[in-house]
Image (cartoon, rainbow, N blue to C red):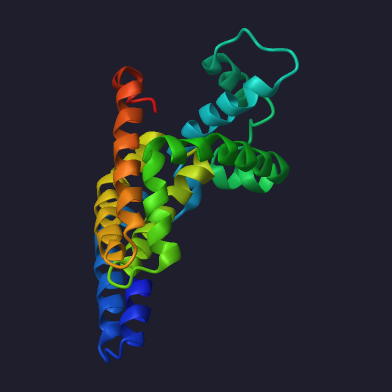
Amino acid sequence: MAAFWWLWERRRGNPHAVWAFILTVTWLGLLLLPSLFITGSNFDRFDRSMGSFMFTYVELSMPHQFSPSTQSIDDVVDQLKAGQFRESTSIFKFITQHPGLYLGHLGLSAAKGLPYFLHSFKFMLIPMASILLLKAQRLRHLLLLLLIAALLTLIPAWLLSYVRIRYLIKFFPAFIALAIAGCEELGDSRPWVNVVIWTSGIGTIIWQLIYFNDIWVNSHFL
């Protein structure tokens, strides 16, 4: 985000734009410095992610077996730890030791996570796309910046697990606010955009109400 802002401001002729990037990187480094002292910089020591990864790996792989297993995910994970993945004590080791399996996992993770984008933003994806395609001048770059921030936040989840609704929903208020503001700007010259934002908003609310009970019960796991 800092690099994006630096390039944007430099394009607008700001001679001091680079300082925003330098200061952001500096204070981020200072915030992360204590963790490096506590845990070190060795990637092999960050083994908590391996536990999360193994459960997700089994969860995604089990439905694709020709002979469905009656064992629980916990039992299958224990078998993999004692067997094929015995030496994979970290994500880094797993990737280097089993690159083919990891690429297959990424494919399953992407296929599992894509529908959640639709379930999270629902019909509001239409006005968001309108702002980018029709190039709303005042807010288009802010929405683009938010998209970049969302991608950089969600990619780690995709690499270790899969993108769930609870990962996406944190961006929902900002996306909705920018989508509405952008459509109001476009609506001055394109009245049909106002119809799109109202229709999408009402449709999203109805969709949410239909599945409200499921969201209420399963919100932590989504």
Which image quarter is the C terminus in?
top left
Q: How many marks?
A: 0
Q: In which quarter of the image is residue 117?
A: top left
Which image quarter is the N terminus in?
bottom left
Give me the residue at 33% from left, 26% from top.
Answer: 220
Establish if 189 lies above or below 129: below
Q: Is 193 left or right of 180, judged from the image as shown? A: right
- Most distant residue in the top direction: 70
Give me the residue at 38% from left, 64% from top.
Answer: 144
Q: Where is residue 140 in the image (x, y as percent from the top left)?
A: 34, 67
Residue 33 seen: no
- Most distant residue in the right direction: 66
Q: Position of residue 172 (x, y in %)?
A: 30, 45
Instruction: Decide which of 36, 151 is in the foreground and name it.
Output: 151
Q: Where is residue 65 in the image (x, y as percent from the top left)?
A: 71, 20
Give me the residue at 31% from left, 76% from top.
Answer: 21
